[in-house]
Image: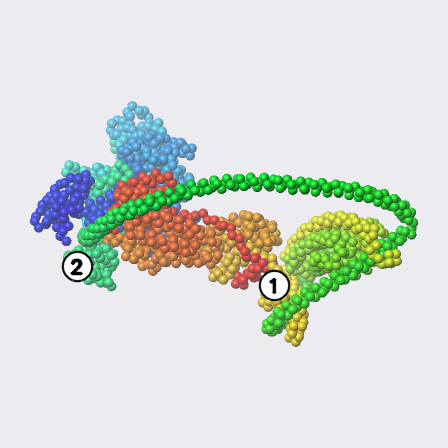
Amino acid sequence: MSAAELYTKGAKVWITDPEVVWKGAELLQDYHDTGGQKTLQIAYEEGGEDTITIKCKDNLPPLRNPDILIGENDLTSLSYLHEPAVLYNLKVRFIDKSVIYTYCGIVLVAINPYEQLDIYGNDIIQAYSGQDMGQMDPHIYAVAEEAFKRVARFEENQSIIVSGESGAGKTVSAKYAMRYFAVVGGSNADETQVEKKVLASNPIMEAIGNAKTTRNDNSSRFGKYIEIRLNKNNQITGAHMRTYLLEKTRVVYQASEERNYHIFYQLCAMAQQPAFQKFKLGHQDDFYYMFQGSNPTIDGVDDAAEFKTTQEAFSMLGITDKQQMMIFQIIAAILHFGNINIQEVDPSGEQAQLNESQELALSGLIEATRIDRNDKHLPIMCELLGINQDQMKKWLCNRKITTVGETLIKPLTVTQASFGRDALAKHIYAKLFDWIVQHINIVLSSGSKENKFIGVLDIYGFETFEINSFEQFCINYANEKLQQQFTLHVFKLEQDEYVKEQIEWSFIDFYDNQPCIDLIENKLGILSLLDEECKLPKGSDDNWCRRLYDKHLKHKHFAKPRMSNVAFIIDHFADKVEYQSDGFLEKNRDTVLEEQLNILKASQFELVADLFNDGAKETAKKSKLSNVHMRPGLSRVSSHEGKQPLKGQTMHKKTVGSQFRDSLSQLMETLFSTNPHYIRCIKPNDVKQPFNFEPKRAIQQLRACGVLETIRISAAGYPSRWTYPEFIQRYRVLAIKKDVVKRDMKQTCRNILQKLIQDEDKYQFGKTKIFFRAGQVAYLEKLRSDKLRACGIMIQKHVRGWIWKRKYQKIRRSVLLVQTFGRGLLARRKALYLRRTFAATKIQKMVRGHMARKMYKQIRFTIIRMQSYARGRFARERYVKLRQDAKATVIQKMAKGWLARRRFTKIMRGLVLVQSHYRRRKAKLQLKILKVEAKSVEHIKNVNKGLENKIIELQQKLDVKNKDILQLHRDQMELFNARKEIEKLKHTTENAKLSSNKISELEEYLRILKAELEKEKQEKKDVISEKEILKKDKQMIVEALNNENKSLKDKLNEANQRIKDLESHNTSSDKVHHQVAEDKQMLLDEMAPEREHHQRLVKDYERLQQRYDNLHDEFLIVSGVGLTGKGVSRTPSNLSEISIDTDTDTGTGTGSDKEEKKGKTDPDQGYGTERRPMRDTLLRKGLTEVEGQWKDHNGTVEKKQKADRRTSTSGLLEEKKDDSKEDVTLLLKLQNRIKVVEKEKRALLERLELGEGELERVRTFSSADDVAYSNLHVQELEMENSKIKTEMKKLRECITLDMDSNSGKGGQAYKEFMDQFQAMADELDRRREECVQLRSLMAGRARETHDIANEHYRGSIDIINEDNEIVMAYKTLQQVTRVQENQIEKQKRDQKCEASDFKEQIKELKQENERQEKLIGESLESLSPEKRLEVVIEYEINRLTSENLDLQEENDKLNETLKKYKKALKKLRNKGSDNVSDFPDLDELESSMPTPLKHRDREYMGMLEVNKDDIQQLVRHLVVDLKPKVAKSMIPCLPAYILLMCIRHTDYSNSDDKVQALLSTVVGGIRRVVKKQAGDVNTVSLWLSNTCRLLHNLKQYSGEKTFQVENTAKQNEHCLRNFDLSEYRQILSDLAVHTYQQLLIQMMEQVQPTVVAGILENEAIVGLSGSKPTGLRGRSSSRDMVSDDHIHTLDSMLKMLDSFYAVLATHAVDKELLKQVFRQLCYFIGATALNNLLLRKDMGHWSKGMQIRFNLSHLETWVRDNQLKDSGAIQTLEPIIQASQLLQAKKTDSNVDSICEMCKDLTLSQIVKILNLYTPADEYEEKVPLTVIRKIQDKIKNRKDQSKGNSLLIDTKYMFPVTFPFTASTIELEKLEVPTSLNIDDFVKRM
């Protein structure tokens, strides 16, 4: 493409300018290359026009890039690559977008912002970690990540080269790079903390190697190369530091406005601290080495605080406090050293104190110096360094010259002495600097194997000042070498890309600075000539400069200044630099007098001496002091001094230049062996003003650092590179249909380019990319924009035509519509007039008619009203007259009646009075007669006989009535049963058909039971045979032990014999042994019967207690039936022939149902029938309470005994076998138990005595006249005594049976107990006989009463109640009943007392059982393993035998039941439905028969017993070895329930140690599993759910009312009783939080690779590209060499979320906790996506916002589909949703308010960043104006809610606080079954 096509009117170009370097302009005319045009008219952007001269076509001004490319993050992606384009792009990014980092190919350009930016936090590190370098915004972390990935993937050593001039930010950049490596490559071992030590070296090196300069407040005055070494796991194992060319001159000299090294000022700031007062420091202005710059402070820097940081860094690196104080002491000595005042010898001074040389000086022969004896700094300096003051004072003013035959001492001039002092100070500081670096390297080195490293080179950039000396020469020499390496690397990468893509190319011509390097370092080069000059005795800077002129004046890179003979010019790659030769030789020699060094070597401080012992390895020859000649001015050295080794005047043989050249060569070898990464730091201005860009300063540094050279190399080749899909996507608009080959993109691109670009050299086709020359992309963009513009014009034409046509049609329709509406309006008006006329006529007619009707109605109403009033008046008058007549008639009637009644009443009253007087007289006469008769005995007998007859007749009548009632009840029951049988017959006929099948099943089940019985019998036989074998083995073992005992006895006898022989020599010992033997024998004799008795009692107690429990249970069952049964069955003792059966309701033959039930329930009732049931109820209630308490007592004892039976039985069996074991304590405990039994016996006797007292009270209360009451009370006492008798009889039988089974021998207490029981039985028999006699007496009296009634009343029963005798008897019975009720209340109180006694007894029994457990456990532990095994085996045999017998009995019962049912079925078949009542229910048959697979003969308590020793095994099987696949097949959270059951047993047994051990082991096991399987989501989620469930279970069963709301009654019974596990609940809560965090970390790690690909890069909307294919060069990264096996998409991310949800649901994670998990995951997805969006420029497009919003909608749909909408997950996605909406929104001034309102969840930094990143994908889009951004900033700053802060990135590691809402479990623990797959049956026992 020719220049005429590019340089057309309107083209934008760059014009040079002396102020801003380059200015933008626009061409006002076309350029014609054929007409020899020499000028061009231009217009500047700032305003104004100008004409430029064009000498030739190559002199045309550079073209500007399209606006779409302005602000790109890679300078090589620009279409036009030249200096103005680079400068302008950097300025736009730095000023307009506040971006300091920009790529330039492989170089990262970093511009110093001169203010702290929030872009280096850990969140930024995490955002760049693992990301591709080309995808993220330029950042130093991206370069560090690229280096780290290359080390990890390709095992290549990497180097990061940071360069730039002073103040450009090199040190900070290197620091951030190392910080990134420390964070990303940090070791997990906390004890090493290598990464912290690496970072700790920075404050130290800054303190001792950095200083303030005019350009930088923290300028590094040395170069350093830090190797960060990594192991195979890419973890930092150590580091190594190499330093280059420390600026030692700064120690003794500082230019104006500069400072010395920071450490000096930090030390002075701490001078007043007690620990530093011994240094005798003061203010910094008091020292010569510190106030020369006249600006000792730095704004915003606290030297004291920095010193503390330095101390902490020293401590971190292992430098002890003593060593630190020694370092600071040496530095303080240097400051004092600089204050030593060296003076000329004063002729007026004292002569006695002058030496020979000074005397010559006074004579004027030579010039001499001295140090004042009052100089205070010299002693301080010598004291701090630990050296001899006199020697140092001497050799500071003199020097030693050694010749062949003599050694001379020569005085120094003031200048020489001062120079020597400064040289020594510099040397001391340099040695200290090297020692610190060496120590840091030792600390940072690691003993582990180091496979690779990453090097960070922080070295000075190219420097040029007004006066350049030796330091600038070395610095620029180093930059020449680095530039050469940089150029070769860039060229190599460029050529490798061409080779990789297999395109035709020619070698690129690039600038080679090897001639300049040869000029410096070759033989006879500048450094070589400098070293030769330094070797000459009289060498000088002038001579060396002249030699340079002679040798290199003709060299093209060397020149001589016109106005100077002591300077030279070198043409470096960046610029020409003039160097002043003054001082080159001295700086190169680095001369230090050896005498001064020898003094330092002899220091009393070890560190000071070690600093200078490196050069003492060479031994010098001893000088021979012969033929010493004296010369003026030289004094002879003494023979003592002459014995010192001879050395030259300098310490080092190598010069500084040679050392620097060698170290630089070594550095270059290292860099060439690594893969380099370049960071070029740019200083934008010299005034350190934030975000101020000076083009002049920037362009100088860009030229010097090689950035422009990179651009030039790129521009020389093919800088623009496109992939084929990107090219087609971008420039498809320039092709026609026939150019497109669907299956061959390369051919399609070829077809397009052949038509667009005629010159084939302008592009090349590679394997995957198209390569373009510079400017071709801009040309293609121009063609594309023209084509789009033409298309736009065409579209506009058609659209505008359509718009005008539509507008015309609209106007025409409007006119027609107006006409229509006008005509209609006129018509409607006329119609309205007609309607109104007609309506007026109609209204007039209606109004007139209405008025006439109204007048007529009014007149008619008036007339009718008058008539009604008149007629009403007439009627009322007539009514009043009639009412008066009626009332008069009524008054007459009432008066006449009253007169008649009064007369009748008067007559009746007289008659009654007469009758009463007569009757009173007759009654008085009758009374007198009765009184006389009453005094006679015969009358009394007749009355009694009549009463007895009435009672007997009444009794007979009641008997008849009762019989009738009972007969009627029987008839009703028979009728009811008949109906019921009929219904049963109907159902039986149907069930009979089904029963035949069940018979076969029952027979099959019987056969199975028989087989099992045979198997049990066989097992029993095997056990018995094994027992016999074990007995035989035991006998053999016993025989062997007996033999061994015999042999031991023999040996013992022999030993005793020897002892006896020895005892003859010691009489006192004989007595002692004899006494001991006697005491021992006495104890054994005393304990023998006790031991035997103890063993018998233990055995008898066990068996007696068991039988007592069984019998007592049966007794309680029998007693319960008698008390709670439906009727009262009388025994022969309480049946009486004279039981009086009465009923209160005698008048009716049949009572109500309630009365029938009452009569049926208790048919034998006498007087007081209504009171007796109440009394019986109270008695039964009291007895039930006592029996219930007794049951609880026995139940508790039985549980304790059953739990301890195995251990106790084993211990007792062993004690029975081994008579040598004795336990006196257990014997005492059993005796106490007997005392308790005696106490219970006494309580029973008290109850018996209470019954007797009650009987006596009844007897005293009874009278001969109240026979019925005595009879009733006797019957009740008989029943109570019978019960007491039965209970005592059973207790006696129980004890008797136990004694019978025993040997019959017992203690005294036992005999007393049996005697008392026998006495009690006798007493009961006596009471029974008395009751029988009393009953017979009452029967006789009843018969006599019956005979008297028959004799006197002749069977007339009605006469019995003539005188209310029965009523009187009834009242008497009521009084008796009240007395009995009082007695019952007293009995209840007594029973309560007994219950309290029983509770105390239970408590004592518990304590006794616990003591027995401990004693038996101790006795078992004392047994040998063989004996313990034998005891256990015997116990198991007995247990199995008893179980077999029980099974056999149960089998026999089942056989009998089966036979019965078979018979019933047979009868049913034969007789049909005749005997249905005999046929049992089949459901009852099935329920009565146990299942053949599971035997649940008892109800479980929901507890699991585990031994303390088996807890580790239980946790290992239940927690550690449990696999998620196994857990899925069980009940969810089954391990948590099993652990709860184990905890409940520990609470039940009150074992504090066991519960602590169990919970601690469980928590530790879960922690180990979670830590070990942290990468397995399945395992972690399994234990998250189980931990939460265990936590909830502990709350649910804690007994706290808060957690018992949803519990069942059974669950409340299962609550913990003894332990408060609230502390362990907190531990479990912490464990759950830890497990929850581990689960989220693993989930986030798995989701992270899918976030960017699924949310940002996934283009689900077809035809809408979210990327902006700009044809960038791209950046080659480590990912280019690695193929991704897994391509992540949105679907893969959703599938991963589905898998997470399925896993959590499978393990029954609580719903609320599941919501919190996915809320956190959604937050992580949104934060990660937003962070990447903010750091990627290629995402800033409208189309990308659409794609992102579409992808997020899928994620929102997934959240809703899984019922997670209320979890807050969607709210966490709001920031990324608002960011996508911001990309789509209009960004104009009118939309500022809507943008601020929309982006409520985004911070100001995020909004501004997105707006700055927004780049139009096409020219018809516009960039966001700066005014809009400023308005949005102002608007958001005024926002009230500023709680979100202003951070750029979201913290992806932030986790929402997790809560575990309590959820109660409905699972019943007693029904849980432990699966065999858990393999814990051997460790737990179900209770």
User: What is the number of the mark on residue 1496?
Assistant: 1
- Residue 931 seen in this snapshot: no
Which numbered disc, 2 or 1, marks the residue that appears first in the sequence? 2
Q: Is residue 490 left or right of residue 954?
A: left
Measured as percent of width and height from the top left, residue 255 is found at 27, 34
Q: Is residue 575 left or right of residue 1473?
A: left
Given contact means CB atoms under 8 Å apart, are the residues at marks 2 and 1 in contact? no
In depth, the one of 559 and 373 nearer the eye is 559
Measured as percent of width and height from the top left, residue 446 is found at 39, 50
User: Against 1010, is 1502 above or below?
Assistant: above
Instruction: Name the residue rendered at 70%, 64% in the picture.
Output: 973
Instruction: Name the residue rendered at 21%, 59% in the picture.
Output: 749
Q: Residues within 10 Å of mark 2 (few under 14, many from 20)?
A: few
Between the C-alphas of marks 2 and 1, the distance is 92 Å
Q: Residue furthest left?
A: 35
Q: Which residue is mark 2?
A: 754
Image quadrant holding the C terminus, namely bottom right
Q: Secondary structure at mark 2?
A: helix
In depth, the one of 961 and 241 nearer the eye is 961
Which three-letter amino acid code belongs to the residue tagged 2? Gln
